[in-house]
Image: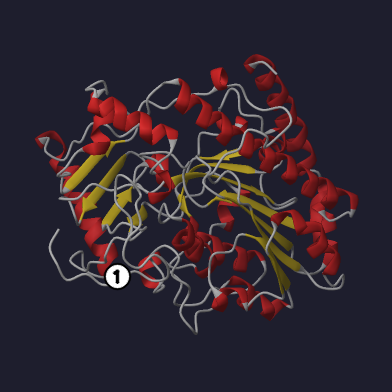
Amino acid sequence: MSTLDRRSFLGSLIATAALAGSAPGRAQAASRRGRAPNILLLIADDLGDRDLGCYGHPTIRTDNIDKLACSGVRFTNAFVTTSSCSPSRTTMFTGKYPHATGAESLHVPLPEGTRILPDYLKEKKYWSANVGKLHLGPVGAAQFDLVLDSEWDWKQAMDKRPKDRPFFMAVGFHDPHRPYQPDTISDPAAASDTIVPPYLVDDTATRSELAGYYDEVTRMDREIGKIDSWLDENKLTDDTLVLFVSDNGMPFPRAKGSCYDSGVRVPMIVRWPGKASAGSVCDSLVSTVDLTPSMLSAAGIKADKGMQGRDATAMFANPATEIRDYVHVERNWHNHDDNQRGVRDRSFKYIHNGRPRVWTSSSDLMGSDSWTSLLAGRDRNELTAEQMRLFMVPRAAEELYDTERDPWEFVNLAGDPNYAGVLARLRDECADWRKATNDYPSERRYKDNLDRFTRTKYGKTSGAPEPYDGND
């Protein structure tokens, strides 16, 4: 489908969905039902915010997610709290920032006594299931009525649900996480159709890797289409709140594992017939720390006082609603130790680097073709200034970006006197947030267990990271 045809198709879908979503029959059906809505949480694994058709990507095939967006609210400023799989999901299910959960580092399970969303939902007699990736450890898994390892078993889970109770089901897709294979789908993307962001090398190897990523996005999209069709066939669409989101940005250098928008801004779509404004776009700030309080509110349950997120359900009905002035992000141990804290408003991003003397990225990316191309380009002195920023050591202790004029966050304004007021405001906001959420000090260190460039393993290679008392 050409870009023009795609736009025409999406435009017609939006118009149709807006009429259907605002029809009195849908709202009346929901009110007649007289019980809390079913909740379906769809979580992509490593999907960037630019990488769906409904977010403007010209070639990725995501017709089903695009359709979901046309019948719901599409958020353009949704952010995760960290660009790392397990701590990001910890936030989604607890309503707390990673450092406040005791599980802020990769692969660290939730501590004993931690309550998550499905346990709170029991107040309204919800039956709960997780299919596919969960990444919360045994404490989290035990709070579901059913846990299945494969996301492809969602229908098996649905068939087990009690028909007289509302359900909460989380589908944790493994797509589009690495590694990629050439036979993911029968009609693979062409490398020539990929869009290479300016922080990556535009070569055959990188484009081929991006094509593999696109294929997994499309495979996930097609499965979401099957789930949506099943809801329709079982007359559950009008009674189900569907929330689609990603756990972090795409799994490429300077995206996943970073505090830049390429790592922490994610797609988010909410469809709730009769409640959410169909075919609308919300540009207000929202964070995944707001998900659990919002889903509890939708179910008619008051959020726990210890939760740090906010109820975003007013944004579903009126996308012009604003519930926060800032979103906050962090980066902790992800096979490599780091301590970054950031804050963003609608126009600017501030990042504090607690370990500026070390280079860091997501360990998933070492050894990838796109990473190898960057290393080779660096060694041949062929990288652009923007691409070389990835290897800058020491890093600036503070970073400040005008995200409207500089969306890729290449120009650090922290030293520009014209932005001293913005820098001071965001620095203070970051410090206040850290204090209010009882963040641990930047000086706390953990040992790496992978070489930062070669991905060679050493030391303890599984479980919680080991404390480190040395210097950078």
Asked whether residue 308 is in view, the answer is: yes
Quadrant where the C terminus lies? bottom left
Q: How is the image coloured?
A: secondary structure
Left or right, residue 158 beside residue 463: right
The residue positioned 78% from the left and 69% from the top of the image is: 166
- Give x and y (percent) for residue 186: 74, 31
Q: Amino acid at mark 1?
A: Ala
Q: In screen coordinates, is 40 left or right of 179?
A: right
Furthest residue in direction bottom, as rendered: 113
Q: Quadrant of residue 115?
A: bottom right
Residue 93: x and y in percent read 54, 67
Disc 1 secondary structure class = helix
Depicted 91 relative to depicted 15: above or below? below
Task: Where is residue 423? Give x, y as percent.
Answer: 18, 45
Residue at 84%, 73% (x, y): give it.
162
Frontmost residue, 138 versus 143 = 138
Q: Is residue 451 left or right of residue 221?
A: left
Structural crowding at the residue carrying mark 1, measured as other residues with C-alpha within 10 Å and reported as few (<14), some (14–19) or many (≥20): few
Report the front residue among 351 and 186. 186
Q: Residue at x 16, y 44 (%)?
A: 396
Toward which corner of the image does residue 401 lie, by quadrant?
top left
- Considering only vertical position in the picture, is 226 above or below 120? above
Residue 22: in sight, yes or no? Answer: no
* Image coordinates for residue 91, horizontal then vertical, percent: 47, 64
For the point 61% across and 68% down, which residue is it?
296
Q: Which residue is mark 1?
A: 436
**Quadrant placement of the N terminus:** top right
27 to 400, vertically: above or below: below
